[in-house]
Amino acid sequence: MEKIKSSVLVFLVIICSLQAYTQPVEQNVKLIIAPDHPNWQYNIGEKVKFKVSVLQYGNPLKNVKVKYELGPERMASEVTAALELEDGQHTIMGGTMNTPGFYRCTVSAEVNGKTYRGLATVAYNPDKIKPAAETVPSDFTQFWDDSKAELAKIPMDSRMTLLPERSTEKVNVYHVSFQNFRLGSRIYGILCVPKKEGKYPALLRVPGAGVRPYNGDVATAEKGVITLEIGIHGVPVTMDPNVYANLAAGALSGYQSSNLDDRDRYYYKRVYMGCIRANDFLTSLAQYDGSTLGVTGGSQGGALSIITAALDSRVKFLGAYYPALSDLTGFMIGRAGGWPHLFNKGNATLTSTTDKIKTSTYYDVVNFAKLLKVPGMYSWGFNDETCPPTSMHAAYNVISAPKILFIAQETGHWLYPEQRENMESWLHKQLKVN
């Protein structure tokens, strides 16, 4: 019985960890909001119209009462109103924007005592969005060069434990760990290595936010790729799910802002260096082909993909879904900043001090994006309420390296299968596998 309970808990944790990457579950009532431009893009000064439809079993619901809000994403609403849809449909006349950015219509409808919510976010000249802080700290590169030099002095002390129950006919799966940027500080992950003797390309998978176990990328390894999926918190990634739940609610609660007033002690320093150390480990493996190394992830992992590729010349390509930690100081100029929304007025736990703002500039994805030299594929949607599209475009627009952006306008902080399929296909092409 205990074994069954444990298996169920593992399953639930895995499902929760995938929620940010999968389409929301279908509901009986659908609230659809469609802008009058099919590509959801507008020119500055142009007004937008939103067609609202409340459907049940594909048919409009009559006499439905709805409430709606209009305004720039994550900012105070410019318009708040209510109306009744006699035939289940209505066109809302929206406003416009005078600067590049994103404008959102949010609608809620109550049907049989249950509230349904939908939104549509349109872009105003998104290719012209500039970072809130247009200058990079003068010692930005030096700071990270020094950090990498400090890391290089720490013995890797790698350890590998074979996981027979996870291994397959073609792939050996290991729980691994190696020392990070400080003696005794470790990074843990799941390594998958093809069993067949030979030299293989390598792919580092970096994680989204949160605290959880990991399964590793066996499927890609079976195609002939060494894969490593890491956690960032310095704890084993094969423990009982309850341990991660306790850490998330306790010691690691709010880790995103831990020591933000000190650039040398901010939580993400160990994380960024942990990604470099993961590459140290991957490239040390006898099975590595010596030249082909990529990195990919979503949300926090999207940020870490850009950062790792910018800091580590061994990385030859990257794939990033809705990168977090982008344009962090956007809120300081009255627009949406990137997750974790450190300087949002509503974030009562954080006071915007000079030290915290200064530290954030050393960790902002925007400043790493400017350093990229390798090709990357990127994908997100305009309806993302976790990683605001304003912040992501601010980072994307400063990338001078070869880049591809696949926009799925309707998606939020989740993916359509087509987004994942396109990304995996592109990554496999870089890895030279089918």
Image (tube, rainbow, N blue to C red):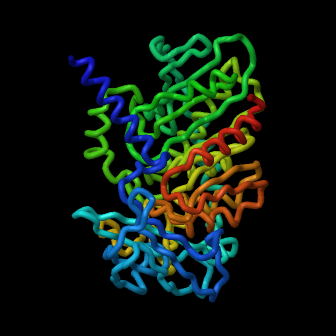
- The number of numbered discs placed on residues in the rendered structure image is 0
Question: Left or right of 17: which side holds 375?
Answer: right
In which quadrant of the rendered view does residue 295 lie? top right
Residue at the (55%, 24%) spot, across then down: 191
Relative to 103, say whether 387 is above or below.
Answer: above
Relative to 300, say whether 66 is above or below.
Answer: below
Residue at the (56%, 49%) spot, across then down: 416
State the quadrant of the N terminus.
top left
x, y percentage for residue 346?
A: 34, 72
Relative depth, front residue between 412 and 404: 412
Relative depth, front residue between 236 and 192: 192
The reply to whether residue 358 is in sight is: no
State the quadrant of the C terminus.
top right
Relative depth, front residue between 410 and 14: 410
In which quadrant of the rendered view does residue 54 lie? bottom left
In which quadrant of the rendered view does residue 280 lie? top right
x, y percentage for residue 348?
A: 30, 69
x, y percentage for residue 323?
A: 56, 55
Residue at the (50%, 86%) spot, across then down: 93
Relative to 113, say whether 433 is above or below.
Answer: above
x, y percentage for residue 394?
A: 62, 68
The reply to whether residue 128 is in sight is: yes
Residue at the (62%, 79%) spot, across then down: 100
Relative depth, front residue between 343 and 381: 381
